[in-house]
Image (cartoon, grey):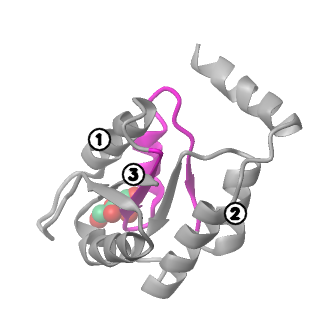
């Protein structure tokens, strides 16, 4: 898969570790930064990844900030984006199966690297279930209009 990734200063180390992990699994990763630990503004990176995913330039996205919350809120302002914060793998699987989340987010101050890897694995290995869940996603899309 082609995966867009972005983060703020709180998550730079974890971002690079997750990038390496995803590439070791054969994924193509497009890095939207930030690549330093200098204080920056998470909405910038949430928007960059969200716009790439919404435009179809990536199959899905991974966003990481301190909690995963701020950067996902920013991403969810982009039409067509369903960014979901997950702190463990069960939620990560369900946000794909039920919500067809196209971005997964987590917090570098909340989860360790091994949990983060389990989260991305659970998300990437899951399939959208469709059916009644599609109806609900259509209702979410209607809110955007
Ligand atoms: C940065 O200090 C922090 O606010 C940010 O990484 C994130 O946790 C916001 O939701």
Q: Which residue lies furthest to the front in this view?
A: 26
**Vertical position of residue 46 compared to residue 39: above or below:** above
Residue 55, image quadrant: top left
Residue 95, image quadrant: bottom right
Q: Is residue 68 magenta?
A: yes
User: Does any atom of ligand 1 lie closer than 8 Å to the CB of label 3?
Assistant: yes
Badge 1: how crowded within 10 Å, few (<14), some, or many (20+)?
some
Q: Residue at x 17, y 56 (%)?
A: 40
Rounded to the nearest whole Å, what is the CA distance between mark 2 and mark 1?
A: 24 Å
Rounded to the nearest whole Å, what is the CA distance between mark 2 and mark 3?
A: 20 Å
Rounded to the nearest whole Å, what is the CA distance between mark 3 and mark 1?
A: 11 Å
> Which dot marks residue 71?
3
Left or right position of 117 against 29:
right
Which structural element holds mark 1?
A: helix
Which structural element holds mark 2?
A: helix
Circle 1 residue: 48
Q: Which residue lies furthest to the right in this view?
A: 132
Q: Which residue is drawn at 19% across and 59% down?
A: 34
User: Does any atom of ligand 1 lie closer than 8 Å to the CB of label 1?
Assistant: no
Circle 2 residue: 93
Q: Is residue 93 magenta?
A: no
State the residue in front, 2 or 61. 2
Residue 30 screen position, x and y as percent: 29, 53
Badge 2: how crowded within 10 Å, few (<14), some, or many (20+)?
many
**Vertical position of residue 25 compared to residue 104: above or below:** below
Which structural element holds mark 3?
A: helix
């Amino acid at each position: 898969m082609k995966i867009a990734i972005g983060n703020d200063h709180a998550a730079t180390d974890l971002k690079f570790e997750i990038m390496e992990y995803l590439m070791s699994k054969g994924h193509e990763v497009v890095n939207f930064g930030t690549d330093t630990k200098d204080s920056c503004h998470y909405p910038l990176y949430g928007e960059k990844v969200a716009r790439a995913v919404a435009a179809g330039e990536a199959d899905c996205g991974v966003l990481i900030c301190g909690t995963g919350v701020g950067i996902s809120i920013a991403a969810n302002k982009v039409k067509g984006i369903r960014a979901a914060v997950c702190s463990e793998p069960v939620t990560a699987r369900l946000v794909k199966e039920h919500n067809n989340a196209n971005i997964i987010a987590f917090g570098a101050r909340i989860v360790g690297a091994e949990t983060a890897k389990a989260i991305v694995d659970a998300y990437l290995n899951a399939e959208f279930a469709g059916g009644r869940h599609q109806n609900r996603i259509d209702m979410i899309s209607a809110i955007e209009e």
